[in-house]
Image (cartoon, coloured by chain):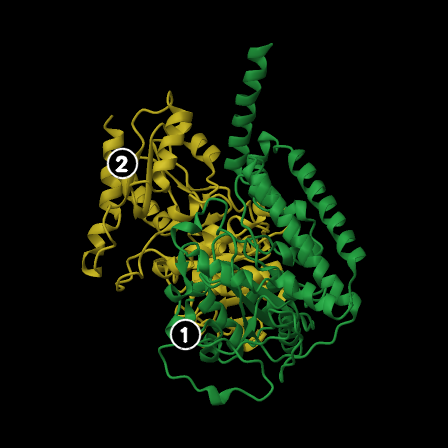
C-alpha cells in the first residue's frame, strides 16, 4: 500500500496494524478493542490477526487500564491504550497525571514511559453526557505529557506512528466527528515532525489557528470568506503540547491578525495560552487583539443544543469580521 | 484494636482452628505464626521454614541495621537535615521477611516506607534519603535492583506491579512481582482494580499489605469491615494473614506466595498484621489519636526482641555477634549521617531535566529563559 484514500478510522487502524507488525513490544489495550474492534471500530480485525495477547480486552476500569499500561511500559512494552470516550478518561486522570507524566523525571531519566493514550474526543455526534467533551487543556497543562490531535487521515496514520515510537507518554486525541472523513494517505511518505504545525491553507489577511475537528470548520470558513474577498490562512496546529509557537508567530507576522478556534471551553483553554504568548511575541505586528472562538464555561450541553455550543461557520466568521474591523 | 473490634461482634467458630496451630489472640482471625512473641518456635500446618543459624543471624542483622538506619533518619529529620521521614519502626519483620523472600529477578513496587525491603534488594540506604531531603523525587535507577521508585500517591503502584507482572507472563519469564501497600491504600480504587486485573490475567504478582493499623490517624476499621486478607477471596485468589512481627512466618508465607506466582498460579494477597510504632511521618502526632496502652501492647510483640530471644535460647548467637552488630549499626548510622550532610543541592537547571525523554519545545524555551535570568545575577555581581 502506498497512497490511497482512507477515512480517519481506517487510517488509525492501518497505523496500529503497522505498529503491531513492526514492533513485537507494541500492545493494544482497552475496553471492547478485541472482538468488537472498539465502539468506533478503530481496532477492527486487529485481535483476529494479532491475538488476544497483543490486542487486549481489559476490565472496565480506566485507572486499571492506564496503571497496568505503565507497568507494562516499565517491563519494556509499548502499550497503546484506548479510552472509550473523552468523558471516561477521568477515572484514569490520577494515573496519567501523578504517575505516567512524572515517572521519567522521578527516576532522573533512568526509565522511559512509551505509553500512548488514544481518546476519541469532541462533540457533534448527538451523544449523551460524557461522550462529547474536549479535555485537552487539562492534559496539555501537565508537564511530562505530550498532546496531539490529527485533523485528517494522513496525519492520523503518521502522527500515531510517531506517537507510538516516542519514548514519552503521548495523549492522542482523535476527532471523533471526523472519523469518517476520507483523504489521501501515503504510507511510504516521509512525515514531518510530530509537533510541527501545518499550513492547511495559505492566506494574507488573518490567521485561523485550529486543531483536530475544527480544522475542517476553519477551512470552510476560509472558503466562505474568500467569496467576500478575504484571504484567510488556516494553521492546523496538530500538537497542543508542545505548541508550535514559531509557526503561529510566522503566520501572524504575515497576516497581523489571529483567531483561535477549538471546541473546548475558551476559559483557560489552549487558545488562552496561544493568545497570551502570541501577544508577547507579536505585540507590534498585531493589528487586532487575538480572539478566541470555542465552547462556553458550561457543561457540554444536551445534544439538541450542541450546535449552539460548538463553534460553527458563523461564529468563526463573526470573529474574523471583528478582528478585521480593528 | 481495629479490625478485631468489628470481628468480635460476630459469632466466631473456634472449631475451625486446626490442631497444632498456634492459638490466635481472642477476637483475632488466625494468623500464620512460626515464632511467638516470646521467641518460641512453633509449627504451622501450611507454612514451614528451616533456616541455618547463619541465615537466622542474617535476618536479625537485617532488622537491626534497618531499625538503626530508620532511627538515624528520624534523628536527621529532627536536626533539620531531612524535610520529612516516614519511619518503619515496628515493621522490620514484615519488610525483611518479605524482602528476603524475593529473588534478584523478581521486581518490587514499594510505597514510601519500604526502607527494609530496599535494604534487602541491595539499594544503598542513602539513595532513599534524597527525596526526603528534597534533592530529588526518588532518583535511583529502578532497574538496577529491580526495586521501583517510592510511590507517594497510595495504591497507584499496585497497578504498576500488576502491569509489570502481565509483562513478565508475556515474556514467559519465571520471576514474580511484589506490590507493597498499607491498610489505608486498601481503600483505594487502584488497589481494587489491581486485584481485578491480576486475577483475570492470572498475573504473577503478590500483593503485600502491611496492615500497621493506622493510616495517619484513620484506624483500619475506617478502611474495612472484614479482615483485609479476606478481600482476596472475592477476586478469586487466596489471601492470608501473617503475623507481621514474626520474620520467619513472613518469610515463609511470602516465599510460598512468590513461588505460586512463578509457577503460573496467579496472584495472592498477604496481610502482614503489624504495627506502626512511631508516627505516620515526622509531621504527624499520634498522641492526638491513639492510646499509649496500644503501643505498649505491641511493644511486647517487637520483631527484633523475639528473634533475639530465639537466637539466644537456641545458642545460635553469642555476645560477640550482638556486640559486633552494634558496632556495624553505629558505622552504618555514621555513614548515613555523613552522606546526608554532604548531599549537595541539585543544580538549578535540574528543574528542566528529565521532564521528557524526547525533548519539548516549551521546556527548551523556558530553560533558556531561566538560564539567562540566572546569568543576569552573575553579571550584576561583576
Q: Please give the letter of the chain rendered in yellow.
A: A
B314 lies above or below A253: below
Could you say which is closer to the camera, residue B85 or residue A326? B85
Could you say which is closer to the camera, residue B309 or residue B204? B309
Q: Please name the residue shown 44% across and 73% down the image.
A: B227
A308 lies above or below A84: above
What chain does mark 1 sit on?
A: B
Q: Please name the residue shown 25% across and 25% down the image.
A: A326
Residue A197 left/right relative to A302: right
From the top left corner, tell me how far across and down residue B160 is, in percent.
55, 61
User: Mark 2 against mark 1, which lies toward the viewer?
Assistant: 1
A279 lies above or below A320: above
From the top left corner, tell me how far across and down residue A27 is, in percent.
57, 66
Query: Which mark is drawn over residue B84?
Result: none
Which quarter of the rendering shows the N terminus of chain B? bottom left
Q: Please name the residue shown 39% across and 30% down the image.
A: A278
Residue A190 left/right relative to B182: right
Residue B301 left/right relative to B221: right
Residue that lies at the very extreme toward the top in this rendered image: B382
Residue position marked by numbered label 1 in the rendering: B226
Residue B136 visible? The answer is no
From the top left corner, tell me how far across and down residue B317 is, in percent.
78, 63
Q: Please give the letter of the chain rendered in green.
A: B
Asked which secondary structure carries label 1, the reply is loop
Query: Which mark is drawn over residue A320?
Result: 2
Residue B192 visible? The answer is yes
Q: Marks 2/1: CA distance?
A: 64 Å
What chain does mark 2 sit on?
A: A
Could you say which is closer to the camera, residue A326 or residue B328? B328
Label 2 with label 1: CB-CB less than 8 Å: no
Amino acid at each position: 500500500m502506498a497512497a490511497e484514500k482512507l477515512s480517519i478510522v481506517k487510517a488509525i487502524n492501518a497505523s496500529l496494524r503497522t505498529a503491531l507488525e513492526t514492533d513485537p513490544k507494541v500492545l493494544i489495550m482497552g475496553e471492547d478493542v478485541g472482538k468488537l474492534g472498539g465502539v468506533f471500530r478503530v481496532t477492527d480485525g486487529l485481535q483476529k490477526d494479532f491475538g488476544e495477547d497483543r490486542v487486549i480486552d481489559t476490565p472496565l476500569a480506566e485507572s486499571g487500564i492506564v496503571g497496568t499500561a505503565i507497568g507494562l511500559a516499565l517491563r519494556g512494552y509499548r502499550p497503546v491504550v484506548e479510552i472509550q470516550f473523552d468523558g471516561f478518561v477521568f477515572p484514569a486522570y490520577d494515573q496519567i497525571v501523578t504517575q505516567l507524566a512524572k515517572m521519567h523525571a522521578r527516576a532522573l531519566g533512568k526509565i522511559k514511559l512509551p505509553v500512548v493514550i488514544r481518546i476519541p474526543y469532541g462533540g457533534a455526534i448527538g451523544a449523551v453526557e460524557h461522550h462529547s467533551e474536549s479535555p485537552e487543556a487539562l492534559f496539555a497543562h501537565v508537564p511530562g505529557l505530550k498532546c496531539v490531535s490529527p485533523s485528517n487521515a494522513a496525519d492520523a496514520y503518521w502522527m500515531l506512528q510517531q506517537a507510538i515510537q516516542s519514548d514519552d507518554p503521548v495523549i492522542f486525541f482523535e476527532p471523533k466527528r471526523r472519523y469518517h472523513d476520507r483523504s489521501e494517505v501515503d504510507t511510504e511518505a516521509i512525515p514531518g515532525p510530530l509537533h510541527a504545525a501545518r499550513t492547511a491553507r495559505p492566506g494574507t489577511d488573518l490567521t485561523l489557528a485550529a486543531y483536530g475537528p475544527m480544522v475542517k470548520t476553519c477551512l470552510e470558513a476560509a472558503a466562505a470568506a474568500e467569496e467576500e474577498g478575504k484571504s484567510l490562512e488556516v494553521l492546523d496546529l496538530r500538537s497542543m503540547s508542545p505548541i508550535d509557537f514559531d509557526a503561529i508567530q510566522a503566520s501572524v507576522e504575515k497576516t497581523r491578525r489571529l483567531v483561535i478556534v477549538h471546541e473546548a471551553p475558551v476559559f483557560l483553554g489552549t487558545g488562552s495560552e496561544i493568545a497570551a504568548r502570541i501577544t508577547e511575541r507579536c505585540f507590534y505586528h498585531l493589528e487586532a487583539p487575538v480572539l478566541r472562538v470555542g465552547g462556553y464555561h458550561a457543561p457540554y450541553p444536551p445534544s439538541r443544543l450542541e450546535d449552539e455550543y460548538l463553534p460553527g461557520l458563523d461564529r468563526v466568521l463573526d470573529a474574523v469580521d471583528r478582528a478585521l474591523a480593528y | 484494636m481495629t479490625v478485631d473490634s468489628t470481628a468480635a461482634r460476630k459469632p466466631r467458630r473456634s472449631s475451625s482452628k486446626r490442631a497444632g496451630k498456634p492459638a490466635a489472640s481472642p477476637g483475632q482471625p488466625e494468623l500464620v505464626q512460626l515464632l511467638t512473641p516470646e521467641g518460641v518456635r512453633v509449627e504451622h500446618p501450611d507454612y514451614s521454614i528451616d533456616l541455618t543459624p547463619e541465615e537466622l543471624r542474617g535476618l536479625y542483622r537485617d532488622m537491626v541495621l534497618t531499625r538503626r538506619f530508620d532511627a538515624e533518619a528520624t534523628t536527621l529529620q529532627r536536626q533539620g537535615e531531612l524535610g520529612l521521614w516516614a519511619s518503619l519502626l515496628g515493621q522490620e519483620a514484615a519488610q525483611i521477611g518479605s524482602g528476603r523472600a524475593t529473588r534478584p529477578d523478581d521486581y518490587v513496587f514499594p510505597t514510601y516506607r519500604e526502607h527494609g525491603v530496599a535494604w534487602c534488594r541491595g539499594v544503598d540506604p542513602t539513595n532513599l534519603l534524597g527525596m526526603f531531603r528534597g534533592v530529588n523525587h526518588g532518583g535511583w535507577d529502578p532497574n538496577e535492583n529491580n526495586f521501583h521508585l517510592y510511590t507517594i500517591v497510595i495504591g497507584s503502584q499496585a497497578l504498576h506491579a500488576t502491569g509489570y507482572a502481565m509483562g513478565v507472563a508475556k515474556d514467559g519469564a519465571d520471576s514474580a512481582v511484589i506490590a507493597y501497600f498499607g491498610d489505608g491504600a486498601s481503600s483505594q480504587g487502584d488497589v481494587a482494580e489491581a486485584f481485578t486485573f491480576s486475577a483475570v490475567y492470572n498475573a504473577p504478582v503478590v500483593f503485600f499489605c502491611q496492615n500497621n493499623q493506622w493510616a495517619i490517624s484513620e484506624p483500619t476499621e475506617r478502611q474495612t469491615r472484614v479482615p483485609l486478607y479476606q478481600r482476596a477471596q472475592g477476586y478469586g485468589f487466596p489471601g492470608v494473614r501473617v503475623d507481621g512481627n514474626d520474620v520467619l512466618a513472613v518469610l515463609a508465607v511470602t516465599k510460598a506466595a512468590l513461588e505460586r506466582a512463578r509457577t503460573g498460579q496467579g496472584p495472592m494477597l498477604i496481610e502482614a498484621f503489624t504495627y506502626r510504632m512511631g508516627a505516620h511521618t515526622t509531621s504527624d502526632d499520634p498522641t492526638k489519636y491513639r492510646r499509649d496502652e496500644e503501643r505498649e501492647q505491641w511493644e511486647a510483640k517487637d520483631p527484633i526482641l523475639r528473634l533475639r530471644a530465639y537466637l539466644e535460647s537456641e545458642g545460635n548467637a553469642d555476645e560477640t555477634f550482638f556486640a559486633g552488630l552494634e558496632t556495624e549499626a553505629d558505622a552504618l548510622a555514621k555513614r548515613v549521617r555523613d552522606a546526608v550532610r554532604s548531599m549537595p543541592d541539585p543544580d538549578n537547571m535540574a528543574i528542566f531535566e528529565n521532564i521528557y525523554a524526547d525533548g519539548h519545545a516549551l521546556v527548551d524555551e523556558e530553560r533558556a529563559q531561566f538560564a539567562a535570568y540566572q546569568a543576569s545575577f552573575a553579571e550584576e555581581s561583576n
